[in-house]
Image (spheres, grey):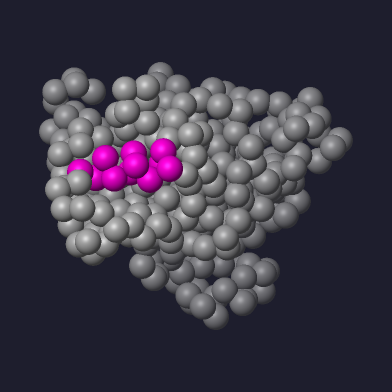
Amino acid sequence: MKVRIRFFARFRELLGSEIMEEITKGTSLAELVRIIALRRSREGYDALFDRGGTFHPFVIIMRNGVRLSPPEAEHVQVSEGDDIAIFPPVAGG
Amino acid sequence: MLSEKERERYRRQILLFGEEGQNRLKDAHVFIAGAGGLGSPVAIYLAVAGVGSLTIVDNDVVELTNLNRQILHRDRDRGRPKVDSAVEKLREINPDITVRGIQTTIQERNIRSLVEDVDGIVDAMDNYPLRYLLNETALSMQIPLFHGAIRGFNGQATTIIPPRTACLRCIFPHPPPVEVFPVVGVTAGYIAMVQANEVIKYIVQCGELLTNRLLLWDGLESRAEEIKVDKNVSCCSCGTGREETGI
């Protein structure tokens, strides 16, 4: 089963822009992102997750254009063809 | 009514949206929150477009480290209040409009009076607490809010038209960690142009606004992408969360 994960802004610098990932059925969205982040960059992982492995509250998680809260991302299972976007708010002006 | 001089000054854009559109710009009052990286180019382009009244608010003075991106200010302005420096330049750029500078910190006790007769608020702030305050004020007074933010080569922008579109809290319920953000001036310029363009379209009533969409600019990859965003029914600023949190 294949899904697409896109990172934006600072997350893109740390983890890469677009990743096509082959995953097993039943994987949660948060678990998928943890696996990818750990494999790619420790700094990238820390930018996304706290010490307990939970998404930081400010991280924006979108699945097929629909926003998920960090707790929802723990439960939602990814499906074939899903398009996942992960990005931080930027603050400067 | 436009004067002969104004017809001449704005001739190229009157070709685009007619004297009616130009009159709308002339009659408009836009509030720019911040005279920094975003506020400078937004103010310059709204001034040259002929927005009749601009109010620009900032509490800081010009510092050397501002000058890589805050293009209203010059080396000689170091130590001057940013609003004084900004008003001087904007009046030079277009003496046919009214520019007002207010040196103050935007806060809960003054924001409503600052924006009471404006047609739009430009978010050119550098922190989320003040952005959330602008958002709350825009929602309660039903004033459009033109959001922009930058970091490094990255930027984001969206347009909020209360009460019908997603608000800033719907999109960003939690602020990112506070930091001294890295930035290059061109990022501020890019996002500021999106904001100024939105303001002009809103006033002139043309095109399609950047509502319920978040534009994400990646200057390193030269890529602009867009994320669809919806109103969050439980949003603590415009949804059911508002009652729960007592905001």
In this view, the residue in front, B1 or B199, is B199
* Residue farthest bottom in this picture: B15
The quadrant in which residue B110 appears is top left
Residue B213 lies in the magenta stretch: no
Which residue shows up at 62% across the image and 70% down it?
B10
Vertical placement of A33 versus B179: above or below? below
Side of B73 relative to B153 (left or right): right
Q: In this view, does A22 lie to the left or right of B130?
A: left
Check the image and report above or below for A63 versus B101.
Answer: below
Residue B235 position in % (x across, y down):
21, 35
Q: In which quarter of the image is residue B126?
A: top right
Q: Nearer the viewer, residue B46 or B53?
A: B46
Residue B110 vs B216, above or below: the answer is above
Q: Main structural element of the magenta stretch: helix, strand or loop?
A: helix
Residue B41 at x, y = what percent?
A: 63, 51
Quadrant holding the N terminus of chain A: bottom left
Q: What stretch is highlighted in magenta?
A: A28-39
Residue A17 shows up from this direction? yes
Residue B48 picture location, percent across and down: 64, 60
User: x, y percentage for residue B40?
Assistant: 64, 45
Is there any visible trace of residue B88 in the rendered image?
no
Q: Which residue is drawn at 30% across and 54% down?
A: A84
Q: Going by the image, does A70 lie left or right of B174?
A: left
Q: In this view, does B161 lie to the left or right of B88?
A: left
